[in-house]
Amino acid sequence: MDNSLDFYAEMRANTRIRSRIKIRYQILSDDSSVCVTKSTIAKDISTQGMHMEVETLLGLDTRIMIEFRLPKIDEPIKAIARVVRVEELKEGVFGIGLVFEEIKNDNKDEILSRIESMDIVRLLQITAQRKASDLHLTYNRPPILRLHGRLVPLEMDPLGTLELKNMIYSILNDAQISRFEKFKELDFAFSPNPDLRFRVNVHVQRGNVEATFRVIMPDLKTIQELSLPNVVEKLSLLKKGIVIIAGPTGSGKTTTLAAMVDIINRQREAVIICLEDPIEYIHTNLNSIIKQREIGTDTLSFSVALKRTLRQDPDVILVGELLDTETVRTVITAAETGHLVLTSLHAPDTIQAIDRLISIFPPQQRHQACVQLANCLNGIITQLLIPKKDRENRVVATEVMIMTDAVRNLIREGQTMQIPSIIQTGARYQMHTMAESLKRLYNSGMITKETAIDYCSELAQILT
């Protein structure tokens, strides 16, 4: 055995890193006869060995010549490894654990460092430890964190095409890889350990496989802990109608919806069916029955799942996002037939949320959609995450619209531009505008004047 390899292994923690590295291998026989070269995939790799699948049952201590490539190392890496573990995965397929006995390339330190750099789980741990909201893996840039709204590159080398693909594919199973390569898009949740959970989007950018990881906090937070208005709890406990959480990407809509489901779970005996893409927060049944169904895994689409959901005796339906006409139409039907529907919508304010819902329908159906929406909508909470004065954390700012007779009439008549004036004068119904929320945050010393004006320009003439 190469003693220098022992030295490098001792210098590093022997963490197994997920991988999908292509391997060429040849079984070394005692009589020095030439064996056929075969190909497979390494499922994980460490500084001391790897795990891969083969179609031949091998005995312990069998020696194998392997060849593989690592990003940013020009020459193929050749090594001799010994079988230390064997398990039958399915008929005719065996998982084998290998320990490196000799690495033939000269620069072993570079090889072992490169293996360590492929550890995507380590990157995710850093993301969580630094309390970032997102991790971006993108071509020709080092891994980048979104930290309190700012993009902060990690002190690492830029990621190349092969490096990116290997890292991202290392956390995908075969079915996910097949789906991604077919549709060029993939959304799923990934949990490397019980304390870490991420929402993941894998996509292609100029021919490179890239990914964005959104941190999912492990514990459900209450409405009070999230600094949301108390009316959110009131809306959660309604028996029917639609409640919409609106806001741009990354504004905490999913977290708010999870808090609302938790309120119902603790205070009602209800069947709650959650349609999510992907499942982020995991709920435990308390007073309610909660069924969480993931789009693409448990069901084909929001619209297909919604139609079936109405036959599953639901009291509450959560729809992760309103994306198409069929989903919106079925949501309205569910609300009209006596169900509470909680959902989210990408929109920067209340008016655009309503207009976006209506514009999903063909022109000839929009008047009827306005009438139906006016009858079944309960309220819209629009939220933004705003940097605090210390720039180390963020705080939520909200706009609340509660359905009143005046609001219903404006929606029926398509006069949505008049709704802000109703919100401004609707304090007795627990309504308030985004400007009022930002002003309160400024007056309480939580955000700066500049930040408040950045998010609402009309405050420039009001704040002193």
Image (cartoon, rainbow, N blue to C red):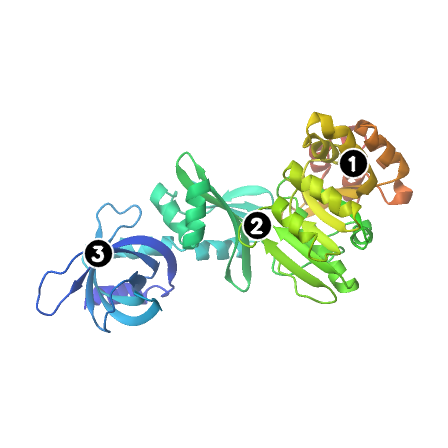
As drawn, which residue projects farthest toward the bottom? 60
The residue located at (66%, 65%) in the rendering is 284
Screen quadrant of the N terminus: bottom left
Q: Are marks 2 and 1 in contact (CB under 8 Å)?
A: no
SS under mark 1 = helix
Label 2 environment density (alpha carbons within 10 Å; few <14, some 14–19, many ≥20): many
The circle on residue 295 is 2
Please indicate whether residue 27 sits to the left or right of residue 325 in the image. Answer: left
Could you say where residue 108 lies in the image, as x and y percent from the top left?
A: 24, 57
Which of the two marks, 2 or 1, is nearer to us in this view?
2
SS under mark 3 = strand
Decide which of 370, 415 is in the foreground and name it.
Answer: 370
The circle on residue 435 is 1
Decide which of 83, 184 is in the foreground and name it.
Answer: 184
Gap in Å between the C-alphas at discs 2 and 1? 36 Å
The circle on residue 38 is 3
The residue located at (72%, 60%) in the rendering is 271
Could you say where residue 420 lies in the image, as x and y percent from the top left?
A: 82, 32
Can residue 445 be seen from the camera position used here? no
When asked about the image quadrant of residue 359, the answer is top right
SS under mark 2 = loop
Gap in Å between the C-alphas at discs 1 and 3? 66 Å
Q: Name the residue type under label 1.
A: Ala
Could you say where residue 351 lies in the image, as x and y percent from the top left?
A: 76, 32
- Above or below, comparing residue 48 to residue 378 in the picture: below
Screen quadrant of the C terminus: top right
